Amino acid sequence: MALHPKKHEMPTQAPEVRAHNFDEVALGYPVEIALEEAKRCLNCKNRPCVAGCPVNVNIPDFIMKVKEGDFEGAYQIINQTSSLPAVCGRVCPQETQCESKCTMGVKFEPVGIGRLERFVADWHNANSKEAPKQPQTNGHKVAVVGSGPSGLTCAGDLARMGYHVSVFEALHTAGGVLVYGIPEFRLPKSIVAKEVETLKDLGVDIETNVVIGKTLTVDELFRAGYEAVFIGSGAGLPNFMNIPGESLKGVYSANEFLTRSNLMKAYRDDPHTPIQKGGRVAVVGGGNVAMDAARTALRLGAEHVYIVYRRSMDELPARREEVEHAMEEGIDFRLLNNPVEILGYNNPDDPRDPKNGFVTGMRCIRMELGEPDAKGRRRPIPIEGSEFTLDVDTVIMAIGTSPNPLIKNTTAGLEVNGHGGIIVDENGLTSRKNVYAGGDAVTGAATVISAMGAGKLAAKAIDEALRG
């Protein structure tokens, strides 16, 4: 039987419908399509897709189980190496990782590995009622700082080895960037909550509203009996451009904008932590976070949403799928443009005027691409005399984040680099004995799956250090 040359399409909500709701855009494979997609896997002997996965999921074996109709068996194979399969199936950039190594991709489209992983995880969550068995304890205690993807992965792996693990989360809900950073229409919060509950069933303790570096310090964790600490606190400190007008009302970091919408439920009619809704919105940046902010603003009632990015579409770092979804929903991409000033209303004759200090526009300059920079991307160069003004009343800066310095400033001997990232060795060990770190706290903002890989690596190193 001839193999299907293209991966089977993922069913989605229609753009004109989904642009006005927060329901998940991608609807998932039905059983029939999952079975057909699984047949495209060649079950290669050298398994290049496994090498392309940062947590080394045994991809051909789980897909073989899907072919056989053993969906629970497929889940158990994934679960051997991944603590968050339903999350990874939705937000991992498979196209640049496992799927980029797929042998089918040499002549045809690669197998839809991520789509099959999502199908398997969703099937398990809908049909399996049996809680995982708690392993026998080994008597050792480990503290994990942060409940994002690196922290949850590290905690899950250690719990399966028999460790007593406590996860300390600064916010009131566990999940880290999975709940405050990624919108509901890409990653439903119920999915994250289910994954967290699975870890709790394994015996992981999760304590929320604990800010390590303020509520407790790393040193106090050791004094409380924890033998090792893993820092997976993420990169929650937003970057700004330092251009005139960034302090005006109506200017947000994407971090704040998404946190208020995703976690604080600012989309409600009577929110406790409101954000500016409606009007004309400019999102500065071209990554996945910029796409999330733009599409969230649209769903909150914006009349028009711009993506303003200083390079071309070829350099745009966001996932192609997210870019395509944003375009289908009507997001206006203004490429090769860069902001130089945010304009605001100011009435010096009446400082009590409620409009004082609000955004009224954003002045931009057109760019052209020059020679490649140190990272290989062509450097954007301003075109003299090409300035223009965008008529907007909200500006969202989505140009990256850095690690918060709180833990560094309260932990003696913890070395960081010039960007504030914690310095670690090849096993995730920091400059402090028995203190490990991984994810965005080390690398700066990166992918969910790379953070998970760092958490898995550190868990292995912690086990070797504490038990030899």
Image (cartoon, rainbow, N blue to C red):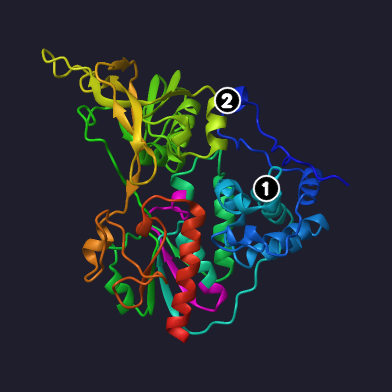
- On the question of residue 206 being in view, the answer is yes
Q: Nearer the viewer, residue 212 or 238?
A: 238
x then y, percent, for residue 254: 37, 37
Bin the neighbour count of mark 2 within 10 Å (Cα to Cα): few under 14, some 14-19, many 20 and up.
Answer: few
Question: Is residue 402 toward the left or the right of residue 262 in the image?
Answer: left
The residue that mark 1 highlights is: 106
Question: What secondary structure is marked by label 1?
Answer: helix
Q: Residue at x 72, y 64 (%)?
A: 45
Residue found farthest to the front:
371
Question: Is residue 193 toward the left or the right of residue 401 in the image?
Answer: right
How many marks are shown on the rendered structure?
2
Q: Nearer the viewer, residue 435 or 364?
A: 364
Q: Residue at x 33, y 73 (%)?
A: 221
Q: Residue at x 30, y 70 (%)?
A: 218
x then y, percent, for residue 316: 45, 35
In terms of image quadrants, where is residue 258?
top left
Residue found farthest to the top:
349
In terms of image quadrants, where is residue 403?
bottom left
The Cα–Cα distance between marks 2 and 1, rounded to whole angstroms, is 29 Å
Q: Residue at x 80, y 51 (%)?
A: 39
Q: Amino acid at mark 2?
A: Glu
x then y, percent, for residue 289: 43, 39
Which mark is first along the chain, 1 or 2?
A: 1
In the image, residue 165 lies in the stretch drawn in magenta: yes
x then y, percent, for residue 99: 63, 50
The residue that mark 2 highlights is: 328
Q: Which mark is residue 201?
A: none
Q: Which residues are magenta?
A: 158-177
Question: What secondary structure is marked by label 2?
Answer: helix
Bin the neighbour count of mark 1 within 10 Å (Cα to Cα): few under 14, some 14-19, many 20 and up.
Answer: few
Q: Amino acid at mark 1?
A: Val
- On the question of residue 149 being in view, the answer is no
